[in-house]
Amino acid sequence: MSIEFSKPLTATETPIPGVVLFDLPVHGDNRGWFKENWQREKMLAVALPDFKPVQNNVSFNEKAGTTRGIHAEPWDKFISVATGKIFGAWVDLRQGPTFGNVFTATLDASQAIFIPRGVGNAFQTLEDNTAYTYLVNDHWSADAQGQYTFLNLADETAAIQWPIPLSQAELSDKDKAHPRLSQVIPMPPRMTLVLGANGQLGKALREAYKDDLSVEFAGRAEFDLDSKEAFASRNWKNYDTLINAAAYTAVDAAETAYGRRAAWQTNVAGVARLAQLAVEHDLTLVHVSSDYVFDGTEETHTEEEPFSPLGVYGQTKAAGDAVVSVVPKHYIVRASWVIGDGKNFVTTMAGLAADGVKPTVVNDQVGRLTFAQDIATTIRHLLKVTPAYGTYNLSNSGASQSWAEIAAEVYALVGASATDVSGASTEEYFRGKPAAPRPRKSTLDLAKLRGTGYDPVPARHRLGSLLKSDVQK
């Protein structure tokens, strides 16, 4: 076998998304040759996904013309030739616009190819005593065979030009019986699971993903973060993303003995189990944070500001953020002053205006509203664009305001007088009432998020839309 020595490590994209062909550096002399068949650090630098292989298999074929496939498996594979030469054929059998795309190549020991889950692969040996090896990122099991997708080697649509005609090749009876492309049921994508799907953010996520069948929603009844049993209730190999919209958010109740335990249980212990799950199964974990992780002494909070929570709720959110940050693939979306479907500050103020009430509202806490629909849109944007993993601040755009200024704006928008709203300091407003400490300055810096190509909608625009729709109900 003639092998080209000392080629640089290079990666070539193919017509099938995610399928990458590699040229491997092979070093040899009169004694033979040596190659780094799989070198994680170098290959990550030239487009190999960090797919975390757990099993190494070798297929030996005694005779040229041995042909295997076309099999699409529910895991990723990194395939290379150990000895001999093969003709490889790959067909995209995944659900989506590239279903049926074909790529073929001849591989010797100086090449390798990465095949993502759901792409059918087939090999025909071109020399006697050919062996190829493949790394996979899941353990083979008899149960997994039920998740395979197959295509007939002789499918007319794929029209693969086999170097050795199939009539002269060595095939198994099973491979001969596989369906044509028109009869193949495409392999569905891995699922996204939204937790806390019945809350304000959960409802917004339901709306954002209403047309995406790969997104599954679970309320507390279907998946309770506080239940260890819930974490054993699913086959996590079928998922690639977790969106955690579940949280304990009763800021004042968190200061009580019962609330303190409940907040730590959900916001920290439950999140820690999610983080462990994400690490074990290589999932992307999306988690929603809060401006309450800060003490509010800075005029504007960046993602790099150290945690300085004032109360129990903020402490549990900061602890949850710290846990999520160790997950290799994570997005923390830190939001302030969330407004979602159902009872919230805006609808409460609108109701008071309709009733002719002249409320007193806190005027020394300053920040920006974040509408739940924009949190959902931001999450979808991050998962689609996949910028660097980490924390991203989010609020709606516009000038920072106090709660009293927002209330006055609501009054004006619904036709009442803005002067009906009077202001009071936090100390005055909560005097004699059990209340958690609150950050006085909650304005979040949005530069990092804008750098991903997402520009938040102005808060005034969302405020007007919400009040208009509320009136129409």
Image: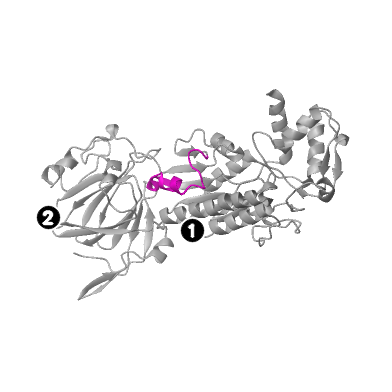
Quadrant location of the N terminus in the rendered image: bottom left
Q: Residue at x 36, y 64 (%)?
A: 9
Give 427 or 405, whichever is nearer the viewer.
427
Q: Disc 2 marks which amino acid?
A: Lys
Give 90 or 357, whichever is nearer the viewer.
357
Q: Is residue 223 magenta?
A: yes
Q: CA distance from mark 1 to mark 2?
A: 44 Å
Residue 40 vs residue 352: left or right? Answer: left
Residue 151 vs residue 39: left or right? Answer: left
Residue 37 percent coordinates (x, y): 30, 65
Res 339 → quadrant: top right
Question: SS of the residue at dot 1?
Answer: loop
Q: Over which residues does the magenta segment extend?
A: 220-239
Which mark is drawn over residue 63? 2
Residue 446 shows in this picture: no
Which mark is drawn over residue 226? none
List the residue tagged with mark 1.
328
Instruction: Give the mark, 1 or 2, whose residue is nearer the N terminus.
Output: 2
- Mark 1 in CB contact with mark 2 (< 8 angstroms): no
Residue 424 percent coordinates (x, y): 85, 45
Give 340 or 11, whichever is nearer the viewer.
340
> In the orientation shown, which residue stands out farthest toward the front?
257
Question: SS of the residue at dot 2?
Answer: loop
Q: Disc 1 marks which amino acid?
A: Pro
Q: Alpha-carbon neighbours of circle 2 within 10 Å: few (<14), some, or many (≥20)?
A: some
Res 200 → quadrant: top right
